[in-house]
Image: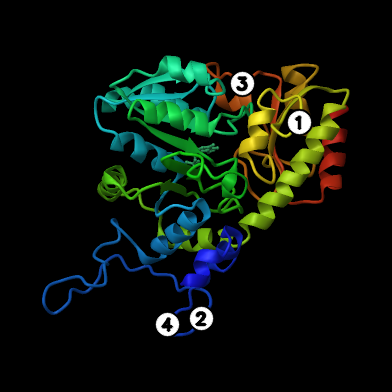
């Protein structure tokens, strides 16, 4: 156990925390699928297992790995990133005010704007790359949570986590960070002062485009975490055991996958910056990116595997480019081993801040030269 405290997150995830199954001595933990459990003779449940909607041993093992990756005392896994985030917002309770980014994962922004008020949660959207704008949106006494997503979909702005944590704590609020695209490999929001980290584990944590999952990791196992655990149990939001098993397997290679994707994204961002068909490259690793300095301070070891390009000849040319790729997959989502390309405005609709000429790229772990050749030919009609 003392050893574990010294091991890096990469080592812990590679060995799924190094647990050995007591009965078989297997180095891969067994998959627990039971939904119900036998009571002890004296009517207690000493195993800690009662019913599958509240908890599951395979899910707990996945949570322990997410907690280790984020340096958190506890974590919870959900059936999707959306359900993880929504459980947190519901956990704030009616009357809560939330400050959230104008640019963020569109589906969650839509939920905050259109659905959260029906649950008694009021939301104001602010330019989250600007601490002054966040400060101006805070309602002292009412604001319970600042929500950040950094880097943020699909324009890849970077928010100052430590600065936003100071703002939140100054008014007795909490800071939560959607760190899906930064990944625990490059950013540790809890160490920077955040109270909760959220992941769409569907993306990099699992990494193989075959599991829908979400995670919350908590800086302290407090009453909010307990409330969210209750909400998860009552609403049946827990991740299924098969998905938890696959997620554990995916996280074993998280570090390698994410570093490979980020190296390719960085290389592609540089080459695309000089491409005649591209008018702008949006990537926090580029020196001209407006938030590059904060990205350099906050993202350690890489800037992530996501970038966007604006196609010089406009929307129709962008859509035609996405139709011409042969290796990149023209599909939504991100963070898998395969490179994905998407015309985001087609997905997000008219309320989106996404320009119509933008293509979002999720670098995979393929050979970067193959990725480059395919993009280059697709950009040149
Ligand atoms: N947050 C970000 C940054 C995402 O990209 C996504 C999904 O695309 C989500 C949250 C929602 O996650 P899920 O699709 O797992 O519900």
Callout 4 crowding tier (Cα within 10 Å): few <14, some 14–19, many ≥20: few
Q: In the figure, 26 relative to 225: above or below? A: below
Q: Which disc number belongs to residue 354?
A: 3
Q: Which disc number belongs to residue 209?
A: none
Q: CA distance from mark 2 to mark 4?
A: 8 Å
Q: Nearer the viewer, mark 1 or mark 2?
A: 1
Q: Nearer the viewer, mark 3 or mark 1?
A: 1
Task: Quadrant for the C terminus, please.
Answer: top right
> Which residue sits at x=76%, y=46%?
263
Q: CA distance from mark 3 to mark 1?
A: 20 Å
Q: Which residue is mark 4?
A: 22
**Residues at badges 2 and 3 in contact (C-beta under 8 Å)?**
no
Q: Nearer the viewer, mark 4 or mark 1?
A: 1
Q: CA distance from mark 1 to mark 2?
A: 45 Å
The yes-or-no answer for disc 4 within 8 Å of ligand 1 is no
Q: Is residue 364 visible?
A: no
Q: Which residue is mark 1?
A: 286
**Residues at badges 1 and 2 in contact (C-beta under 8 Å)?**
no
**Residues at badges 3 and 1 in contact (C-beta under 8 Å)?**
no
Q: CA distance from mark 4 to mark 3?
A: 52 Å
User: What is the secondary structure assignment of the residue under circle 2?
Assistant: loop
> Which residue sits at x=52%, y=23%?
128
Mark 2 vs 3, N-terminal side = 2
Q: Quadrant of residue 241?
A: bottom left
**In the foreground, 337 or 268:** 268
> Which residue sits at x=48%, y=78%?
20
Q: CA distance from mark 2 to mark 3?
A: 48 Å
User: What is the secondary structure assignment of the residue under circle 1?
Assistant: loop
Callout 2 crowding tier (Cα within 10 Å): few <14, some 14–19, many ≥20: few
Q: Which residue is mark 2?
A: 26
């Amino acid at each position: 156990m003392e050893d574990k405290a010294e091991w890096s997150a990469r080592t812990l995830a590679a060995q799924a925390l190094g647990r050995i199954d007591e009965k078989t001595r297997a180095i891969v933990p067994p998959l627990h699928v039971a939904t119900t459990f036998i009571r002890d003779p004296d009517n207690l449940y000493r195993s800690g297992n009662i019913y599958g909607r509240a908890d599951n041993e395979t899910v707990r093992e996945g949570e322990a790995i997410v907690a280790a990756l984020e340096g958190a005392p506890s974590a919870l896994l959900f059936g999707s990133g959306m359900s993880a985030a929504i459980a947190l917002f519901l956990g704030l309770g009616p009357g809560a005010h939330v400050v959230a980014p104008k640019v963020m994962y569109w589906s969650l922004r839509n939920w905050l704007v259109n659905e959260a008020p029906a649950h008694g949660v009021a939301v104001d959207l602010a330019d989250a790359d600007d601490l002054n704008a966040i400060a101006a949106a805070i309602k002292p006494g009412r604001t319970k949570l600042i929500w950040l997503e950094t880097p943020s979909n699909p324009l890849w702005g970077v928010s100052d986590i430590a600065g936003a944590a100071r703002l939140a704590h100054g008014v007795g609020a909490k800071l939560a960070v959607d760190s899906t695209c930064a990944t625990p490999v490059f950013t540790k929001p809890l160490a920077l002062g955040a109270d909760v980290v959220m992941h769409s584990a569907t993306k990099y944590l699992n990494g193989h485009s075959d599991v829908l999952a979400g995670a919350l990791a908590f800086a302290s196992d407090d009453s909010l975490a307990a409330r969210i655990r209750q909400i998860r149990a009552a609403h049946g939001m827990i991740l299924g055991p098969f998905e938890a098993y696959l997620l554990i397997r995916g996280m074993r290679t998280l570090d390698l996958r994410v570093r490979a994707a980020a190296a390719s994204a960085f290389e592609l961002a540089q080459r695309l910056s000089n491409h005649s068909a591209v008018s702008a490259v949006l990537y926090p690793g580029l020196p001209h990116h407006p938030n590059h300095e904060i990205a350099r301070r906050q993202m350690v070891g890489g800037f992530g595997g996501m970038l966007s390009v604006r196609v010089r000849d406009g929307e129709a040319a962008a859509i035609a480019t996405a139709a011409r790729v042969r290796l990149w997959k023209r599909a939504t989502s991100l963070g898998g081993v395969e490179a994905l390309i998407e015309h985001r405005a087609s997905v997000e609709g008219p309320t989106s801040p996404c320009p119509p000429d933008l293509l979002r790229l999720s670098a995979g772990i393929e050979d970067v030269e193959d990725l480059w050749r395919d993009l280059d030919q697709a950009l040149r009609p």
